[in-house]
Amino acid sequence: MGEAYIVAAARTAGGKRNGRVSGRHPADLAGAVLDDLVARVRCDPALIEDVVMGCVIQAGEQSQNIARGAVLASKLPQHIPGVSVDRQCGSSQQALHFAAATVMSGVMDCVIAAGVESMTRAPMGLSSEVLAKNGYGRAKSPRQETKYPDIVFSQFTGAEMLAEKHGFTKDEMDAFGFDSQQKAITATKAGRFDAEITPIEVVGPDGARSYHTVDEGIRFDVTLEGVRNVRLIKEGGRISAATASQICDGASGLMVVNERGLKNLGVEPLARIHAMSMTAGDPVIMLEEPLFATDKALKRAGMGIEEIDLYEVNEAFAPVPMAWLKHTGADPRRLNVNGGAIALGHPLGASGTKLMATLVHALRARGLRYGLQTMCEGGGMANVTIVERL
């Protein structure tokens, strides 16, 4: 089995709902990242053999195979194909796994793994609403109802269940949410995201043109008291919007190659894919699976958690990374060192390659070796990717 290397990693700065990048069609948003990846390695774009793109809400402007749409919106040659992947929040992390497996097998030498989600233009629930309006039934099937009677699969419910199971108080989760904002503020002011961000040209209300380069969800004036006063998502619950990931518009991508691809492109790798795993568990609590997927990935890699220098655990809700820390015994100082989705946003299908772009650049900036990425996914699934900086 061959190796898989990441030679370029980029993401857009996150945009708030109806924010600075909401005017960009998702295909154009993703296309800009594809162009940036090619520019970063200064390669012949004809050497790219496929684009695998994560996207969750594949309806409206994100339907009709958004991956192919992004290729056609980019400067890539039209002969390059594209395929869209839905592994829920792990969609583009799964795109990375597919790309890595493809180049490791030697079937292809250069594949782009990417993701996009415009949560403004293709909001959550869009596909279900369209189906319901046209007389089609619920996503949950009769046979599923037999197995899981009277249960609504909900990440919000799962988050509350996770907090209760692991005994996290509202105050503890509020402190975690505040800390995420603080880390994102520090990272932004220090320019730690500059190397990974693809500038996106935007037009303001006055017609002035500028570039979007700063994550729009960061609360630069955040206070712990302000976090504590945010209204709870569910009456009687523990989680608020300040301890949950932000709705976000964004795109991200990685160029993945094998040894032959390195030679063909004439580039040096940023990182090597060291291990990959995928597991599934309880679809009701659903958000707990990264804990067990990490166990499997570390065992498969023959590593202990102490050997991992940095971790990116998606902050879908505060109790997810908190439970992950508790379960693994990992060092909290290595977790989401530049902030997470609570501050930076969670553009669903784009978050996988977004987090990996941040992880790879953080490892390089700090001169560290191993990084681990994981995230919870709808349906009780989780991907884990371990990379080695080169």
Image: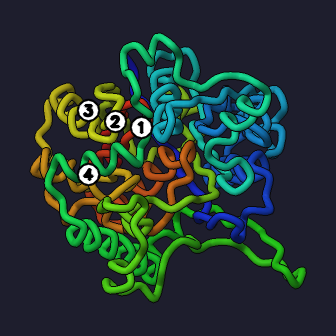
Kindly identify which residue carries mark 4: 369
Q: Is residue 65 left or right of residue 196?
A: right
Position in image of residue 295 (x %, y %) = 18, 33
Residue picked out by circle 3: 293
Q: Mark 4 packing: few (<14 Cα in 10 Å), some, or many (20+)?
A: some
User: In terms of depth relative to the viewer, which is nearer, 233 or 334?
Assistant: 233
Comparing marks 2 and 1, which lies closer to the viewer?
2
Q: How many marks?
A: 4
Residue contact between numbered discs 4 and 2, judged by CB atoms under 8 Å: no
Residue in view at x 56 percent, y 47 percent: 350
For numbered disc 3, what is the local secondary structure? helix
Q: Give the label, 4 or 2, closer to the camera.
A: 2
- Residue 377 image label: 1
Q: Can I make out residue 46 in this image?
A: no
Do labels 3 and 1 touch, CB within 8 Å?
no
Percent across and percent down for residue 64 are 78, 29
- The answer to whether residue 105 is left or right of residue 229 is right
Mark 2 and mark 1 residues within 8 Å of each other at the beta carbon: yes
- The secondary element bearing badge 4 is classed as loop
What residue is shown at x 50% (from left), y 25% (from top)?
Answer: 98
* Amino acid type, mark 1: Glu
